[in-house]
Image (tube, rainbow, N blue to C red):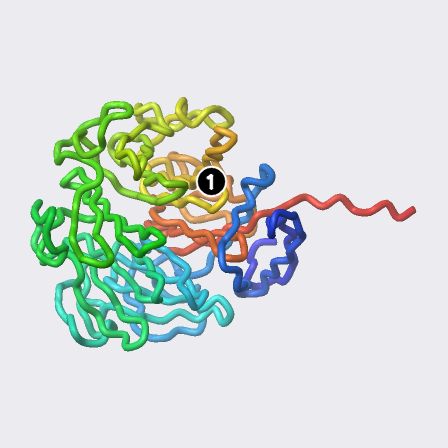
Amino acid sequence: MANWQRACWVLVMLVLTMGNLRVVQVETSGRASAQTRANPVDTVAQSPLSYRIDTLAGNGQPGDTPGAVKNAREIPVDLPFGVEQGPDNAIYITTVGSHRVLRYDLRSAKISSVAGNGRAGYAGDGDQATEAMLNQPYEVRFDSGGNMLIVEMQNHLIRRVAAESGVITTIAGDGVAGNRGDGGSARRARFRYPHSITLDDQDNIYVSDIANHRVRRIDARSGRITTVAGNGKPGMPREQGQATEQPLLSPQGIAIHGGGLWIASFRGHVVWRLDLKTGRIRRVAGTGVQGYSGDGGRPLEARFDGPRGILMSATGVLYVVEGENNIIRSIDTTRDAIRTIAGAGPQRHRYAGDGGAAVDAPLWQPHGICLLKNGTFVLSDTKNHRVRHLLPVVPVTPADPD
């Protein structure tokens, strides 16, 4: 089947619900099916599933996406980076090329702009987010109140779009690259090319401050900013050392799970885990040697090339987007196993593969990934200017007619 938006068929996937396996039907009839589960579940933890890949948005060309469009596959989605499912179940996409945050409606397959006016800059605080100027928004997240948080790499700051009013304000950084502010107000702090953000269950914000080689934390109540990992020097931290006393190398993707902060080191080609109680850091994946190897073995023995965005599921499966290897890998932290779930490897990147196995489909410097509430994935195929969809497939044995 070559095009999932011109066909209607049913995939059967297993979803873990309240401790029991059940069969769920995911109908692909031109749109992704939206569900309202409180917590997304990954299917990788239950069996070594294969994935089918399709395209949700983007026509493969750079360019602006100014207004509401009925068919998201027919318009440009210019260098998509961050992807996230919002509290309204829609998919939110940051586009570095057009300096916007887009909203993709799962039910109608329509796409619209919800932040940014398409021009690069820093302006608009106190007004509607759609009229503001953004500069390379890298990631988008939502707090418990439904407010949208945007990290802008080239503006060196974080902004918030109020859920009720749609008004945008800056909450961290002053728009100037630098390295200052720990112990004081996050609004007066300075970052140097912040890349990723994540929130804990208290709405505290963690920021990967790439060129300062730090990960920083913004307290939700006081607005005070501190460093939780990195001493400002580039390098590999000592195993089980106090994270704030150790060097760190280009932290990018970050995720919180099980009392730990998981950190992808883009130039170090590893993933670290910071214990948020003890403050100690240790390597959990990657040898530190650049490459692509290790599938089927232990994550610590695998080689990565440019890990970027990461995602941790509720069941302890870590998904790592490798921008230079053009792949997505899953790390089962319980079973201590790693494998590739999407992408055809570093030598293949030209857009192809819709309707087929995800591991045969080329990706081109992907950056972001999110796990939807229905157990499927959305990822940004950045240099192919597309947003793509991974659907788990479970082989079904036909019943004996006798």
The percent position of residue 270, horizontal first and vertical second, equals 32, 30
Q: Residue at x 65, y 59 (%)?
A: 9
Helix, strand or loop at mark 1: loop
Q: Quadrant of residue 48?
A: top right
Q: Residue at x 41, y 41 (%)?
A: 258
Q: Quadrant of residue 282?
A: top left
The percent position of residue 398, horizontal first and vertical second, equals 79, 46
Numbered marks: total: 1
Crowd tier of the residue under label 1, counting other residues whose Cα lies within 10 Å: few below 14, some 14–19, many 20 or above: some
Report which residue position mark 1 lands on. Answer: 316
Q: Quadrant of residue 345?
A: top left
The percent position of residue 16, horizontal first and vertical second, equals 60, 49
Task: Tell me if 166 is positioned left or right of 384 in this view.
Answer: left
Q: Residue at x 27, y 42 (%)?
A: 252
Observer-nearest of 262 and 60:
262
Please, is residue 276 above or below residue 144 in the view?
Answer: above
Observer-nearest of 275 and 215:
275
Observer-nearest of 172 and 25:
172
Please, is residue 126 above or below residue 121 in the view?
Answer: below
In the orientation shown, which residue stands out farthest toward the right? 402
Q: Residue at x 36, y 44 (%)?
A: 256
Amino acid, disc 1: Gly
